[in-house]
Amino acid sequence: METKYRTVNKSKVTISELMLPSHSNFSGKIHGGYILMLMDQIAFASASKYSGSYCVTASVDTVDFLNPIEIGELVTMKASINYAGNSSMVIGIRVTSENIQTGKVKHCNSSYFTMVAKDSNGNNVKVPPLQLSSLDEVRRYHNALKRISHRRERSEHEETFDYKSKEALEELKNYNVKVNL
């Protein structure tokens, strides 16, 4: 049986939405939670489109809000797969906003959502292997591998780090915290 690779193009999704006053926070900028909701939706669409399965969000890695989004700006999100594992996929998302009167475009954030493909019973299902077709796609795949490795290292560190040790408690004196046990 021949393996059916899928290309990054099979996962590409773009959405644009005009930001309304109802999307704003108390300072008059677009609420970060609203942007995260849209990002979760496009990650789902991209992963589902690629895998052909229902997908759920397993984790969100690195959401840095670089520039505020104003009411009346057109937000565009572009998503595509960066990595395919057994049942998981890393979806890269780029968010820009455009002042539709001046045409000025700002990069607002980039983020990486790990999505997992599921069957109708909620069990993980295998996703198609990924075919990389450009050096940019190779770069994104390698960067995803690095993020996955760093997440595993952080997890191992949290499991083995002795936060009760004299050294760990002493180190906290270098930070803006008071320990009163």
Image (cartoon, helix red, strand yellow):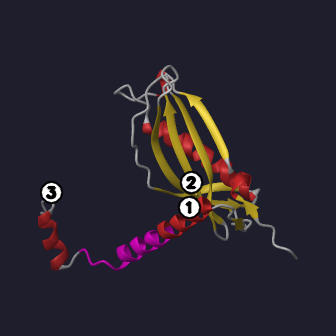
Distance from the alpha carbon under mark 3 to that under mark 1: 36 Å
Q: Earlier in the sequence, mark 3 or mark 2?
A: 2
Residue at the extreme front:
135
Q: Quadrant of the N terminus?
A: bottom right
Distance from the alpha carbon under mark 3 to that under mark 2: 34 Å
- The three-letter code of the residue at mark 2 reads Gly
In the figure, is residue 104 to the left or right of 8? left
The local secondary structure at tag 1 comes to helix
Range of residues picked out in magenta = 148-163
Q: Earlier in the sequence, mark 2 or mark 1?
A: 2
Which residue does the image show at 11% across and 66% down from the upper left? 173
Distance from the alpha carbon under mark 2 to that under mark 1: 8 Å
Callout in the foreground (3, 1): 1
- Mark 2 and mark 1 residues within 8 Å of each other at the beta carbon: yes
Q: Quadrant of the C terminus?
A: bottom left
The local secondary structure at tag 3 comes to loop
Callout in the foreground (2, 1): 1
Q: Nearer the viewer, residue 160 or 120?
A: 160
In the rendered image, the vertical position of residue 174 relative to residue 49, given as above or below: below
Residue 158 included in the magenta stretch of the image:
yes
In the figure, is residue 178 to the left or right of 77? left
Residue annotated with mark 3: 176
Q: Nearer the viewer, residue 62 or 56?
A: 62
Q: Nearer the viewer, residue 38 or 76?
A: 76
- The local crowd at label 2, few if under 14, some if 14 to 19, many if 20 or more residues have their Cα within 10 Å, is many
The local secondary structure at tag 2 comes to strand
Residue annotated with mark 2: 92
